[in-house]
Amino acid sequence: MTPICERIRQISEHIAAVAQRAGREPGLVRLMAVSKTVPPELVRAAMDCGQTLFGENYLQEAQEKIPRLGHGASWHFIGHLQSNKCRDIAALFDTVESVDRLKPARRLDEAAAALGRGLNILVQVNIGEEPQKAGVMPQETGMLLEAIRSACPHLHCLGLMALPPHFDDPEASRPYFRMLREMGKEYAQRELFSNNQQVELSMGMSGDYEAAIEEGATIVRVGTAIFGARPPKGAER
Ligand SMILES: *Cc1c(COP(=O)(O)O)cnc(C)c1O
């Protein structure tokens, strides 16, 4: 077994164990392999050992990788969303997790309409209300969900995504995960998602995914723990 395979297997088992311990259905927590800056050969190695969900942050990088790797996997866009890139993003990805404004949502909707299909999205919430960070502010999230629902018929909004403020202690992320879960619950009651019985919560990364699962994550986004450390920022594209 390759080292990547071994790590995916260990993390998957750990995810299932944490879910079980928290009284949750293990099948409802999916592992996303975050493959930004990871060369295609290593992504292929992950696919070969059964990994089917991947996340990419950069359109240009994804345009080089995804067509080569084929569509045997599900690709989620998790990077900063620029309106002028929405058409290409909609063509390449099956889910966009980083929708945080109406303008790019409209662009994604137009692109999906032109492609003659629907597009899954999550709304990214700036759960720590950090000025420099992407995501809609918590108090504006309900309004954005309502606007998307009425203006973007080709978008299927499946849930919420968040990146809590970075702390060294994973327990420090827990209150933010809990907040996102409560928001999901409230908006499901208001029927703002496509499927209000099963709301997606994309939260938790290599350092804090256990706490995220305990607080209700349905997708954990894990990069470093699978593929190893990335080149420092600036060295990457
Ligand atoms: C890079 C990235 C991740 C993965 O982070 P790791 O700490 O390497 O697991 C998860 N989510 C988003 C949005 C990212 O950009």
Image (cartoon, grey):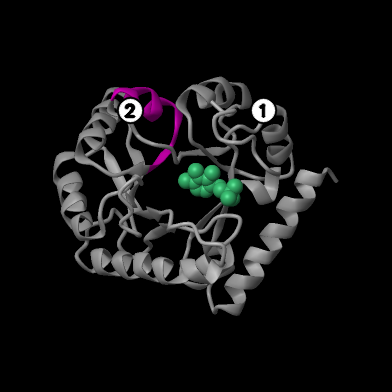
Where residue 67 appears, as percent x and y from the top left, is 56, 22
Residue 83 is at least partly visible in this image = yes
Kind of residue at disc 2: Cys
Count residues near mark 2 (Cα–Cα under 10 Å), then give few for <14, some for 14-19, many for 20+. many
Taking 216 as reference, is 237 above or below it?
above
Based on the picture, tell me whether residue 88 belongs to the magenta stretch. Answer: yes
Where residue 163 appears, as percent x and y from the top left, is 43, 54
Residue located at (70% from left, 40% from top): 46
Q: Which residue occupies the foreground of this view, 71 or 222?
A: 222
Taking 49 as reference, is 218 above or below it?
below
- Which quadrant of the figure has residue 132? top left
Which residue corresponds to mark 2? Answer: 86
Q: Which residues are magenta?
A: 84-97
Count residues near mark 1 (Cα–Cα under 10 Å), then give few for <14, some for 14-19, many for 20+. some
Residue located at (56% from left, 30% from top): 71
Gap in angstroms between the C-alphas marked 1 and 2: 23 Å
Q: Which mark is residue 40?
A: 1
Residue located at (28% from left, 41% from top): 155
Residue located at (37% from left, 43% from top): 98
Taking 155 as reference, is 130 above or below it?
below
Based on the picture, tell me whether residue 108 belongs to the magenta stretch. Answer: no
